Amino acid sequence: MEGMIDASDMPPGNDKIEAMARAAIAELPEAFRAEAEKVVLRVEDFASDGMLNDLEIPDPFALTGLYEGVPLTEKSVLDQAIQPDVIWLFRRAILDEWVERGDVGLSALVAHVFLHELAHHFGWSDTDIAAIDEWWA
């Protein structure tokens, strides 16, 4: 029918973005996959105002992902975890970047954002990541 919206024309929802990230986890070598599976994965449309304020980011479309937690390089077996480590993926910001780029698949972009945040879990800084990852250059 004319004027009807086809479901395939709709942008993927949070569950689809999460499935793409979980597919990226499944492709990791076992040592990294085991550690990645311990991190909670959350998908929201945008970062919360509190997250954006803490990071001094005025535009919610500028933040595609965030790692919240204590990097493995800073953890001690004596530490009591107060809350789990979390990797946040922000669907609307990811979709916006995907459309702007126009040169990568959505699954590849989701995997890349997830792996960037996972690198923070392993103790890498943005500078460390940029030194080996030309995607972010």
Image (cartoon, rainbow, N blue to C red):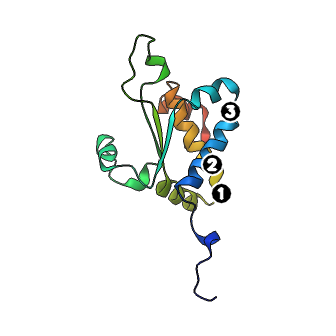
Q: CA distance from mark 1 to mark 3?
A: 23 Å
Give me the disc on residue 20.
Answer: 2
CA neighbours of label 1 inside 10 A, class few (<14), some (14 to 19), many (20+) = few
Image point 38% across, 17% down: which residue? 80
Query: The residue under label 2 is which amino acid type?
Result: Met
Q: Is any part of residue 67 visible from this angle? A: yes
- Where is residue 67 drawn, in percent x and y? 45, 36
| Closer to us: 108 or 1 | 1
Secondary structure at badge 3 equals: loop
- On screen, residue 11 above or below 74: below
Q: CA distance from mark 1 to mark 2?
A: 18 Å
Q: Is any part of residue 137 visible from this angle? A: no
Q: CA distance from mark 3 to mark 2?
A: 13 Å
Give me the disc on residue 28.
Answer: 3
Query: The residue under label 1 is which amino acid type?
Result: Asp
Q: Quadrant of residue 74?
A: top left
Q: Is residue 46 left or right of residue 111?
A: left
The quadrant of the rendering that contains the C terminus is: top right
The quadrant of the rendering that contains the N terminus is: bottom right
